[in-house]
Amino acid sequence: MTRTRRRTLAAAGLVAVTALAACSGGGDDGGGDGGDGTDEAGGSITLWIQEDLPDRVAATQAIVDEFTAASGVEVELIPVAEDQFDQLLTSSAAAGDLPDVIGGISLPQVRTLSANELVDTDAVGAVLEELGADTFAESAIELTSDGDTQLAIPSESWLQLLVYRTDLFEAAGLDAPTSYEAVLAAAEALHSPEVAGFVGATAPGDAFTEQTFEHVALGNGCQLVDEEGEIQLDSAECVEALDFYGNLIQNYSVPGAQDVDTVRATYFAGQAAMFIWSSFILDEMAGLRDEALPSCAECAADPAFLAKNSAVVTALEGPGGSEPAQFGEITSWTVTAGADSEPAQQLIQYMLSDGYLPWIEIAPEGKVPVRLGTSDNPTEYSDAWGDMEVGVDRKAPLSEFYGPEVLEELGTGPERIARWALPQGQGDLLGALQGEQPVATAVNDVTQGTPAEDAATEAAEAAREIQESVS
């Protein structure tokens, strides 16, 4: 059985069980008025969140407990690891046991749920109407909707960043790595047996590899599909982006497949001049989390050494691009098909109002608000975010380690987020690709010597097969 065939069967299975899920629902019947989440209602619902780190789960539980105290709605909180989400979704849908609410879901996951008719769009639309669409970043609403149908309520965003060692760049007289040309020049100048010029994800079948490459590719004008929905992974722009990334890894990086953990570990050890990671790295790089402490030689005396000697580039530009581009993710809340709708709506409304700032405070460096404020105070939440402390075992504001330009880039980043397929109305394809990861496979291939044109052709063919399976 081919990979595409397996993916098609999985999708078909989800669609087949939708009716069962709709009949069973995710929670007990409950009252409530679907309003602001504070009226006594009773009932019981189930919530999945993609926050499986113990400290974040505990913080979420505290917020949920406050909601229960205010509303009378009991909530069973179930943390789900990102790499187990699709499997658990499939098995739960097949068993007619979906949760009522899912939080922290990515844009591709929103599209996967939508494609398999697992979203109660009427309930989601009612939540957005209650909160006010005009209180959200416009791009966030667009990326979480299908035409006029809202699929999820956008909550927060994180940005993909190219992080670089300012001390090494300054000593070598190098420009900031904002373009393909500048990145290659810096990688070549700084690469040595002790310090790699660049480290980035290469592991096949890994979403982090796809995200890293999409960030790089967007800046070169490489798109997954064109305006007509035709696959473009074998375009000249995408071939050039693959060739650029393969060159970096083959000639200026470390040996072996690299994933989210090894990329971070190499930079934290002081063994790389540049790396690509999400904005979640910022508190860890400042030495505020014991489970991910920098280990460079200088870090023994000052755990924040790397943060103080690093800067970020949010948007890259390649020779084939018309302007720099920024990859990022918007995470959202949604009500599932067959959910106990009214208490589910109440919970999401609470998480985007009374519970919003406590939720953002769990990890402000990776939870930049996309609900900027309320109708009465349009910048209430975005203003509060700028003053929040980050960290786990120790707390401090990002401004203690990073300059104002970094904070400004993070705060305004959600309005600049670009993504493959969504602007072209191909969100279902984006969700389907997450199971197969043909782009991550192509990235791994070029880093092992496969010509970029060949890897791009194979990825494009795989994407076309997947597109046919979901059309």
Image: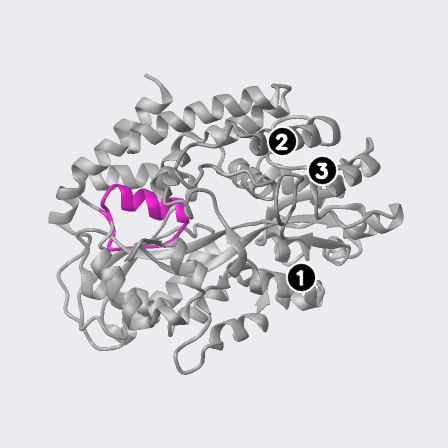
Asked which secondary structure carries label 1, the reply is helix
Q: Residues within 10 Å of mark 3 (few under 14, many from 20)?
A: many
The amino acid type found where label 1 is placed reads Val
Residue on which disc 2 sits: 240
Eye-nearest disc, 3 or 2: 2
Residue 456 position within the rendered picture, expressed as x and y whole percent measured from the top left: 53, 25
Instruction: Report the disc number at residue 178.
Output: none
Residue lying at 35% horizontally and 68% vertically, measured from the top left: 133
Q: Is residue 382 above or below residue 417?
A: below
Asked which secondary structure carries label 3, the reply is loop
- State the CA–CA distance, disc 1 to disc 2: 29 Å
Q: Is residue 164 visible?
A: yes
Q: Mark 3 or 2 closer to N-term?
A: 3
Asked which secondary structure carries label 2, the reply is helix
Residue 279 position within the rendered picture, expressed as x and y whole percent measured from the top left: 58, 54
Residue on which disc 1 sits: 406
Q: In the rendered view of the protein, which quadrant contains the N terminus?
A: top left
The answer to whether the residues at label 1 and label 3 have Cβ atoms under 8 Å apart is no
- Point out the stretch of residues depicted in magenta: 98-118
Q: Is residue 83 left or right of residue 8?
A: right
The answer to whether the residues at label 1 and label 2 have Cβ atoms under 8 Å apart is no
Q: Mark 1 or 3 closer to N-term?
A: 3
Q: Mark 1 or 2 closer to N-term?
A: 2
Observer-nearest of 356 and 408: 408
The amino acid type found where label 3 is placed reads Phe
